[in-house]
Image (tube, helix red, strand yellow):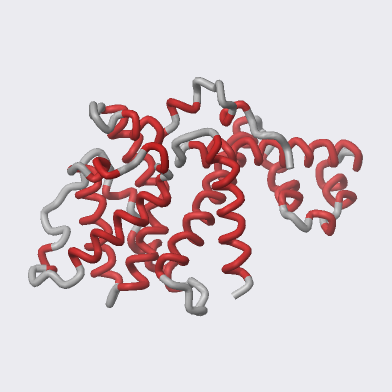
Amino acid sequence: MARPSSIVSRRSPRFATTRWSLVLQAKDKPSPDAAEALADLCRAYWYPLYAMIRRRSRDGHEAQDLTQEFFTRLLEKDFLDDVDPARGRFRAFLLAAVKHFLSNEWDKEHAAKRGGGHRIQSLDVQAFDWDSGESRFLTEPSHELTPERLFERQWAISLLDRVLKRLRDDYLNLDKITEFETLTPFLSRDRDGANYAEAAERLHASESTVRVAAHRLRKRYRELLREEIAHTVSTPEEVEDELRYLFVVLSSTKAQ
């Protein structure tokens, strides 16, 4: 595996400005930048939370109300007071926070009022595509993942999807979308089965040129992956641990 990119260097000043570390730094002194950083994380990772709540809910409408209410409280109240910056991964924080929220909210007599009239501060409600989220949930594997394991699986998938989108945007901006689409199969761990000769023919290039281009694609993918993970952890040292953990989650759920 390639060495981490500069964003995870111990001395990198960029790490302190990533989303979750910015939020943690602002615990005692709230700032607009930190609020927006938290909102960005919520936009990016609302679906894993929705999937977890949906697995425990009676129907999609209840899950939508609970999810919206949770984010309303997360963004409006002092949920961050209990976060320990030394152990503050956003994934772990979010999971613990929603479990606590559900334990308090699930059996309330006035459940019908959940979400009613609330506006999620600093977060466009349209970022939550409920119809798409429900359709996606209904295609989840039928095996019996616990809500917590489903959350972690979808967290990993959402993170990888974001990385792939960023990588695609890179190539789109360079007017190399055909190259990206042709070389994407070489990102797979079983890329040895990919056909370099066919890719070379499609790109009107030599096979050696395609191999170099595929290597660059994988290198950029690894850089973006670590950058995306860095936005959700509090220290550079946690990046590699989180990366390993997420791949373990994906491997274990595929096996079920």
Query: Which residue sits at x=79%, y=54%?
Result: 191
Q: In screen coordinates, is 247 left or right of 102?
A: right
Question: Where residue 81 sits: x, y (%)?
Answer: 24, 41
Q: Nearer the viewer, residue 54 or 3?
A: 3
Q: In screen coordinates, is 164 left or right of 108?
A: right
Question: Where residue 42 sits: x, y (%)?
Answer: 35, 46
Q: Nearer the viewer, residue 56 or 210?
A: 56
Q: Nearer the viewer, residue 242 or 143?
A: 242
Q: Quarter-wise, where is residue 79 in the image?
A: top left
Query: Which residue sits at x=24%, y=47%?
Result: 74
Query: Which residue sits at x=90%, y=42%?
Result: 207
Look at the image and tell me in which quarter the C terminus lies: bottom right
Name the outermost residue toward the left. 110
Query: Which residue sits at x=73%, y=38%?
Result: 2
Question: Where residue 221 sits: x, y (%)?
Answer: 65, 40
Vertical arrangement, residue 159 with respect to residue 49, above or below: above
Question: Where residue 134 sits: x, y (%)?
Answer: 37, 67
Numbered circles on residues, count:
0
Look at the image and tell me in which quarter the N terminus lies: top right
Q: In screen coordinates, is 196 left or right of 80?
A: right
Q: Quarter-wise, where is residue 116 in the image?
A: bottom left
Q: Nearer the viewer, residue 210 or 256?
A: 256
Q: Quarter-wise, where is residue 189 in the image?
A: bottom right
